[in-house]
Image (cartoon, rainbow, N blue to C red):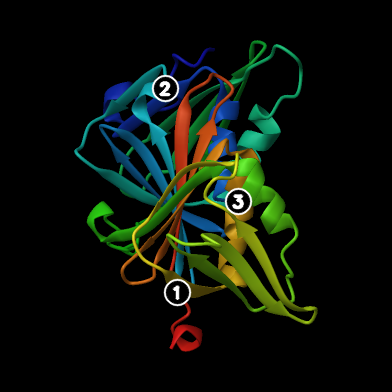
């Protein structure tokens, strides 16, 4: 039996079929947003978007473009369902997370529509494993309405810079304050914890900064607990874009390169802490 075979149903009965020769590419992106149990999957002609939310204040989106797949077929304009992301990641990790050099497990995902399970077919070195994960009806997700027209400040930098800063944050602080300005200190991250006030400044002319576009001076505070999910995509990203809009909303966009050199993106949106910003 191979991945070209279908268990139980004919291919035309599936609303969504996606096949990739290296399941690790999908696993890498799903792990980057795996900070809650449940995820909402949106399938379209452009590919898959996997959305995870917490406390109606933070949202993470992993974008898996259709061209990363060797086969990608969708029968509807949009296919949506909710799935247990922990289970999905665990299945891919156990059956598709091979560490054998030169071995790349193949994956086929099939979804038959409302009420149907998400079927995973994994093949590695001639061994075929199939998993069936129950799905639920998709809930409405938050619309942060974060558009380029409203962006007031943007910094694009190499991820290792922000990774180092985040690793040294005082986690006893409730908030992270982000200062962005056309003038020095340009980009400042501050915490207010049991060790006092700590500032980390990143000047616009730093070797780590690729683009610095700030139109006005802004200072916003965000609950540090809500920003913890950004550590996962940051650990595997090559570049990160930090943007704030005229409402104080924060968008972190991570550029991630897969093993097959495809460029994919993970975005995290976070609401400002209104109490502390008042």
Disc 2 is placed on an element classified as: loop
Which numbered disc, 3 or 2, marks the residue that appears first in the sequence?
Answer: 2
x then y, percent, for residue 153:
38, 58
Q: Residue at the location (45% across, 63% down)? A: 181
Q: Residue at the location (51% across, 60% down)? A: 186
Identify residue for label 3.
86
Relative to 56, say whether 188 is above or below: above
Q: Residue at the location (71% across, 64% down)? A: 169
Disc 1 is placed on an element classified as: loop
Q: Which mark is residue 221?
A: none
Query: Is residue 253 shown to the viewer in this render?
Result: no
Query: Is residue 238 shown to the viewer in this render?
Result: yes
Badge 3, how many Cα within 10 Å: few under 14, some, many 20+? Answer: some
Q: CA distance from mark 3 to mark 2?
A: 22 Å
Disc 3 is placed on an element classified as: helix
Q: CA distance from mark 1 to mark 3?
A: 28 Å
Identify residue for label 2.
69
Which numbered disc, 1 or 3, marks the residue that appears first in the sequence?
Answer: 3
x then y, percent, for residue 123:
59, 19
Please name which of the two marks, 1 or 3, marks the residue nearer to the observer.
1
Which numbered disc, 2 or 1, marks the residue that appears first in the sequence?
Answer: 2
Check whether the beta carbons of the residues at disc 1 and disc 3 lie within 8 A of each other.
no
Badge 2, how many Cα within 10 Å: few under 14, some, many 20+? Answer: many
Q: Residue placed farthest to the front in the image?
A: 183
Q: Which quadrant would the C terminus be assigned to in this image?
A: bottom left
Q: Which mark is residue 272?
A: 1
Q: Is residue 236 left or right of residue 138?
A: right
Badge 1, how many Cα within 10 Å: few under 14, some, many 20+? Answer: many
Relative to 218, say whether 129 is above or below: above
x then y, percent, for residue 267:
45, 50
x then y, percent, for residue 111:
37, 37
């Amino acid at each position: 039996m191979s991945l070209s075979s279908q268990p139980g149903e004919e291919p035309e009965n599936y609303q969504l079929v996606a096949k990739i020769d290296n399941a690790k590419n999908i696993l890498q992106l799903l792990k980057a947003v795996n900070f809650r149990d449940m995820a909402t999957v949106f399938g379209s002609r452009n590919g898959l978007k996997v959305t995870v939310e917490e406390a109606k204040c933070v949202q993470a989106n992993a974008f898996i473009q259709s061209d990363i797949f060797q086969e990608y077929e969708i029968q509807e304009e949009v296919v949506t369902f909710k799935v247990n992301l922990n289970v999905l990641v665990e299945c891919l990790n156990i059956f598709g997370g091979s560490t054998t050099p030169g071995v790349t497990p193949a994956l086929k995902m099939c979804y038959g529509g409302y009420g149907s399970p998400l079927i995973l077919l994994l093949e590695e070195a001639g061994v075929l494993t199939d998993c069936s994960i129950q799905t639920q009806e998709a809930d409405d997700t938050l619309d942060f309405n974060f558009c380029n027209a409203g962006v007031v400040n943007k910094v694009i930098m190499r991820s290792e810079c922000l990774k180092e800063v985040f690793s040294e944050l005082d986690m006893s602080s409730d908030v992270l304050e982000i200062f962005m300005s056309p003038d020095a200190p340009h980009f400042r991250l501050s915490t207010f914890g049991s060790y006092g006030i700590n500032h980390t400044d990143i000047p616009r002319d730093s070797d780590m900064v690729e683009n610095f576009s700030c139109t006005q001076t802004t200072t916003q505070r965000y609950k540090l607990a809500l920003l913890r999910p950004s550590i996962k995509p940051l650990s595997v990203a090559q570049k990160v874009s930090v943007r704030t809009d005229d409402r104080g909303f924060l968008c972190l966009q991570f550029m991630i390169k897969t093993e097959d050199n495809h460029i994919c993106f993970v975005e995290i949106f976070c609401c400002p802490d209104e109490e502390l910003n008042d």
